[in-house]
Image: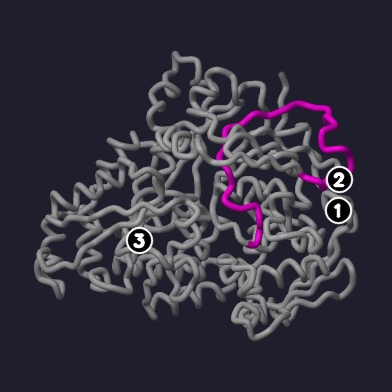
Amino acid sequence: MKKSVSSLFSAVLVSGLLLLSLSGACQLIRKSPFTPTEVDTPVEGEVLNLYGIDPHTLDPAISGDATSHQYIVQLFSGLVRLDAHLEPAPDIAERWDISNGGRTYTFYLRKDVKFHDGRGVTARDFEYSWGRAADPATGSSTAPTYLSDIVGVDKVLSGKSKQISGIRVVDDYTLEVTIDAPKSYFLSKLTYSTAFVVDSNNVKSGREWWHNPNGTGPFRLKEWDENNRLVLERNELYYGKVAELASVVFQLWGGVPMNMYETGQIDAASVSVAYIDKVTDRAGPFYDELVTTPELSFYYIGFNASKPPFDDVNIRRAFSRAVDKDKVVSLLFRDMVERADGILPPGIPGFNENLAGLDYDVNKAKQLIRESKYGDVSKLPPITITTYGWGGQISQELEAIVYQWRQDLGVEVKVRQMEPQRFFYYLKEEKDEMFDIGWVADYPHPQDFLDILFHSGTENNYGEYRNPEVDSLLERAGKELDEELSFALYREAEQKLVDDAATVPLWFGQNYTLVKPYVKGYNLNPMGLVMLNEVSVQK
């Protein structure tokens, strides 16, 4: 999932800025028709109040950003999910068989799964949902990444076929899926929202059908008042653990989360750098309510390797060596994040403790520029970095990095902002010479970082980096069923990516969250998500 590189540092500043920039926007209030009872009939139980921002989309086939995903996983579901140990586990599929040398998966669906409107879910609903995701008309940027292992998906994506040949509906509750080669991570890919089931009648109701989604998840959308409030209501028809909460109210752009938490307006809040001293004070009122969890995330600066000057490896290495990450982490982030030398975050299988990074070294950086085809910074073409945000206010960490390049290398780098909805979904087409971004794991596997972000031609290879040797290593690692051999290949590929300065690794994230004592089960997983049907409020 894409995530703003500046979100951890500047959440408070950005939220205040957005209240100003969106104050004139029209207010749209939508209530979902997909309820077995009247929408306004109160549901008994406790209410959880949270801070939130509007999702960019609630269409599972389209979503590729962390903001949208936090709502989608409450509203929709798929064949498999990640369990507490982040392993693929049964969801709508109660079990599966693997045959044909690891290439064919036969999923046996539960018979008690219903959409929010009460219609039962069958294997044909998955055939429709995956076919729709791969249909070029849908415009999914995630389908090539998460479904392309399935035989025939590439032909549908290219418009050469209307149907995915690798999917066969055996009967109402049996779905057979054939992939192009044995891959240990295939089931994990199906836990991402692109593979979630949607109701064809719902989709056909209009272009903005997802404003009134008829999903299968533990909550249904009761109300969405844009820029103001989004309400999820317990789905009594849910086939899994039915939520104890009656509803979850997200106060959209409601103010400064820390202030809202302190005054009791919300029951949980993420903590930004501005408040870290306040919440870590052992004598203060918040220390016992602070929960710190590691996040499988990677924040980086990407190069547009397809055009000058970053088609020259020495220029990429020079810019990499001219970023003092230790200073950024300690002074700006107050050590709330961990410096990154490589791409794989600590805690992910295959993490390489012995990876050699490109250390901060100004003299070496200047030497690399001299060894490049340009020879001197005065001969570099104009350089602009693309970032996320509104109102022209960039994050302090990006400002510091641009300043370092100016001071250490004598290079002026301009900054161009894109609005979030364009940045998250059009970055590959609209990027400048550099861009800053973060990536949060969709599943805990090296493939989700190395292959998805840096293999030639992949949708999320925003910088269009190409290295046949790296491609070969990643392809071999993906098909290698011996886990240790596979991880060794991934580690080799990661080292080559670092040596080649495919990117500037910046830091790995952590989540700092305040949770009221009466809230139980509010547990962020390493992807930064909370399954709200596991939460209860015991006032």
Question: Which amino acid, mark 1?
Answer: Lys
Dot 2: element: loop
Q: Nearer the viewer, residue 110 or 382?
A: 382
Question: Which amino acid, mark 2?
Answer: Leu
Q: Which of 377 and 178 is in front in this view?
A: 377
Question: What x and y, as percent, mark residue 165?
Answer: 73, 82
On the image, numbered disc 3 is attached to which residue?
A: 302
Question: What x and y, as percent, mark residue 155?
Answer: 63, 83
Q: Indicate the quadrant where residue 30 lies.
A: top right
Marks 1 and 2, how far apart at CA:
7 Å
Question: Which amino acid, mark 3?
Answer: Gly
- Magenta-tinted stretch: 32-61
Magenta span contains residue 40: yes
On the image, numbered disc 2 is attached to which residue?
A: 237
Residue 490: numbered disc = none
Evaluate whether residue 79 shows in this view: no
Marks 3 and 1, how far apart at CA:
43 Å
Marks 3 and 2, how far apart at CA:
45 Å
Q: Of marks 1 and 2, which one's residue comes earlier in the chain?
A: 1
Q: Of marks 3 and 1, which one's residue comes earlier in the chain?
A: 1
Location of residue 386 with respect to 494 vertically, above or below: above
**Residue at position x 11%, y 57% in the image:** 363
